[in-house]
Image: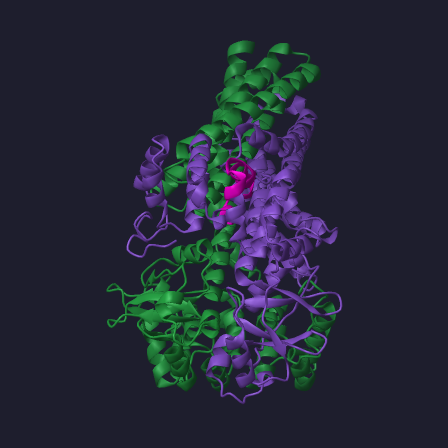
Chain colours: A purple, B green
Amino acid sequence: MLDERAENEPLKDGDYTLSDELFDLVEQAVEQGDTETLARALAPLHPADIADLLEQLDPETRQRLVSLQAGDFDGEILSELDEGLREEVVDALPRKALAHAVRELETDDVVDLVEDLDEAQKEAVLGALDAPDRVAVEHSLTYPEGSAGRLMQREFVAVPEHWNVGQTIDFLRAQDDLPEQFYHVILVDPRMRPTGYVTLGRLMSAPRKTALRDITEDSFRTIPVLQDEAEVAYAFNQYHLISAPVVDQDGRLVGVITIDDAVDIMEEETEEDIMRLAGVGEESLSDRVSEIALSRLPWLGVNLLTAILASLVIAQFDTVIARYVALAVLMPIVASMGGNAGTQSLTVAVRALATKDLTANNVWRVIRREVLVGLLNGAVFAVVMGAVGVLWFGAPMLGVVIGAAMVVNLFVAALAGIGIPVLLEKLGVDPALASGTFVTTVTDVVGFFVFLGLASLVLL
Amino acid sequence: MLDERAENEPLKDGDYTLSDELFDLVEQAVEQGDTETLARALAPLHPADIADLLEQLDPETRQRLVSLQAGDFDGEILSELDEGLREEVVDALPRKALAHAVRELETDDVVDLVEDLDEAQKEAVLGALDAPDRVAVEHSLTYPEGSAGRLMQREFVAVPEHWNVGQTIDFLRAQDDLPEQFYHVILVDPRMRPTGYVTLGRLMSAPRKTALRDITEDSFRTIPVLQDEAEVAYAFNQYHLISAPVVDQDGRLVGVITIDDAVDIMEEETEEDIMRLAGVGEESLSDRVSEIALSRLPWLGVNLLTAILASLVIAQFDTVIARYVALAVLMPIVASMGGNAGTQSLTVAVRALATKDLTANNVWRVIRREVLVGLLNGAVFAVVMGAVGVLWFGAPMLGVVIGAAMVVNLFVAALAGIGIPVLLEKLGVDPALASGTFVTTVTDVVGFFVFLGLASLVLL
């Protein structure tokens, strides 16, 4: 696949972005149906880069490119492709080309691929596989989506725990169907339960008669086959694992998960958090306008309801607003500052929960800390806004009112910002779903109520 | 370090959280100065878990624990520790214990550690190292912070490119100072320029007389020593690298970066994006209240200025508000919906830029898409809010005004949400710094202006 000389040319120097020239070349070749130029342009690219290229092309060019390249379509491109685009590209591939592409893939990649396809496409892919691979894929698919069982590959290297280095090396060198990528030899007991592993590097450097048991890695961890993929990713990150054996309910070795799969999940999980915090669902840049508009509607709808709630609060104070229009001018400042401070606390809390840095053991200390930060910053901005109120409208009492409202709202913002996600986590709901919307509802409602309420008391 | 039997007990089943019992036990042992119980409680824990434990303890308990455990303090705990806490813990360690702890670390971890220490501590750490390690660390420190040179380890395994499998295996088995962790043998030309690499797995399984050149990996990439760490992390993620050779300006091999370092950077980069989007600087759960309050002030200050800007807009319309208080009641809805839609677009754009999915090649298509989404959802909520306006206040013209303002503001929100980060990226500024604040300024100002302006025209 790789041509060494040209390797880095289609990418911009140093930053791995596909160059404009490559795009021009590819678009032109596709338009003219020039398969030869196209093949030459794509040859030096990694499948991940070709997938990026496909994602960034407009849909018609993309589909034409896929048909033009069908005879020579690398299965890994499908694996690398954005999930939202897989159906489209699979549809654009003739059955034979699809079969060819899929047969090159490792079984864990096939599992990942067929998860996103419709039934007919899934059948087409499974039908293209050799019998043993098909069985392996179908077996993995019996594990629940999002579990370790779906992530693992079923090819691994295991040896009896009582072997020594020499025996193991001889065994490995005698095998002719070792997995493509493996980094450890797994030690198993007579019941196939993993008891440790040895890196190939250590195996290479140890004397032949060293017992494997004496050179196993410290950070050995097994992964239960039903474990949630987010926890798997956490374990890889926390314990710096390169690969980890997967075990069934009886502790028996059933597969191996490698770091590349775990990294994918890590990225997906943080991506999901970021999007949820902003009230964005699963979407990708290649989705259609109507799909995206529709997927963003629900949160905007929730926001509308909460905004109306805030308006209802304001409506209670229409007489005082009619008399002192300055209140209408200043009230968004109180709400906005609360919203901002609340979002800061919220984001810190959601991330700390995701990385397991915020736990039952320190939650009260962190809540106290956030609330103190809210009060401190509330005091700072109370003084500033008090002064602004006095200078702008020449009304000292207005300054006092807005200052007091600011302190209260930043206090409440901190409390809501940390309290809501912690509560959701306790209830077993993803804390990122708290999103800006809920916290800003609280800060809007409280901000308007305290500011206008105090104003009514003081000014009327 | 690991005791197999007890391995998973101090962690909650399946989710890798430290158990409440462990905390109670540790806190009690520290209070009573019971080093034996303490040592027994910590023994089964991975250094990463001990670091988490330290982070979650209150400062006094933490410092007492460190002094109690000083004689047996694992250097890796320092590496795993939150950057903000390293100084504190290093201070709590007696000089001798620090020297002992640091000598166990690999040189790339020492580099990572001393980066965060003050000069005196740095000297103490460097002074504790053996001469060759000290030279290696000091050499790495000559590379700029955040560059590949700082991330790499200087221990690697390289062999002449013309060797075969047998020669390589014999060479490896004859070495007695191979790196602790290595996954590839790097092929170099006579000038030490890497030309490919072979995984240990392939080396193990290939016949002895196979030329190394014939079994090199497809996805071979070298990393320039001055490359930014964010790009290094991107390359590892994009090309599924496990390790990659680092080369100097002349293309000569100077070190190796492994996936665990790259994963750390990936996590740091997305974390930074998330925090910046929320206007939070670098902070950690263990920072003091005053530090945190201070670090959050700047963005709140910016937000105050922008909120005042929005208030100035409102102030222009005080006469119409005084006559129609309904406007004051409804205006936050227009602003809030715009802010929400803008944040959605912004978040999608910032992430797409970070993952290099949004490039010069598709930026116009994506902008068009966002704007269309904005218009579509604007139309939906225009109808809804128009109806609400009519039903609530019985004023059809008010419904028309709020509906029109909604369409305009959601259009502007989409444009600002994607335009601001794209512009910042073009200017070489981190697009995540656009943060909610700038976009909501635009949507507040435009929302208030269009709504109140239209209302003045229509109602006055």
Residue B460: x %, y % from top left: 54, 9
Compared with A18, A236 (above or below) is below
Magenta stretch: helix, strand or loop mostly: helix
Residue A168 occupies quadrant: bottom right
Residue A256: x %, y % from top left: 61, 65
For the question of whether residue A386 can be seen, the reply is no
**B36 sits to left or right of A262:** right
Q: Could you tell me which residue is drawn at 28 percent across and 55 percent down?
A: A5
For the question of whether residue A39 can be seen, the reply is yes
Is B449 included in the stretch rendered in magenta? no
Q: Could you tell me which residue is drawn at 35 percent across and 85 percent down?
A: B131
Residue A423: x %, y % from top left: 72, 50
Residue A69: x %, y % from top left: 42, 40
Residue A353 occupies quadrant: bottom right
**A318 sits to left or right of B106:** right
> What span is colored magenta in the figure?
A78-97
Is A94 included in the stretch rendered in magenta? yes
Q: Could you tell me which residue is drawn at 70 percent across and 61 percent down?
A: A360
Number of numbered markers: 0
Could you say which is closer to the camera, residue A74 or residue A267?
Answer: A74
Name, please, the residue furthest toward the bottom. A209
Could you say which is closer to the camera, residue B161 or residue B317?
Answer: B161
Residue A406 occupies quadrant: top right
Q: Quadrant of the N terminus of chain B?
A: bottom right
**B291 sits to left or right of A252:** left
Compared with A168, B218 (above or below) is above
Compared with B259, B175 (above or below) is below
Could you say which is closer to the camera, residue B150 or residue B409?
Answer: B150
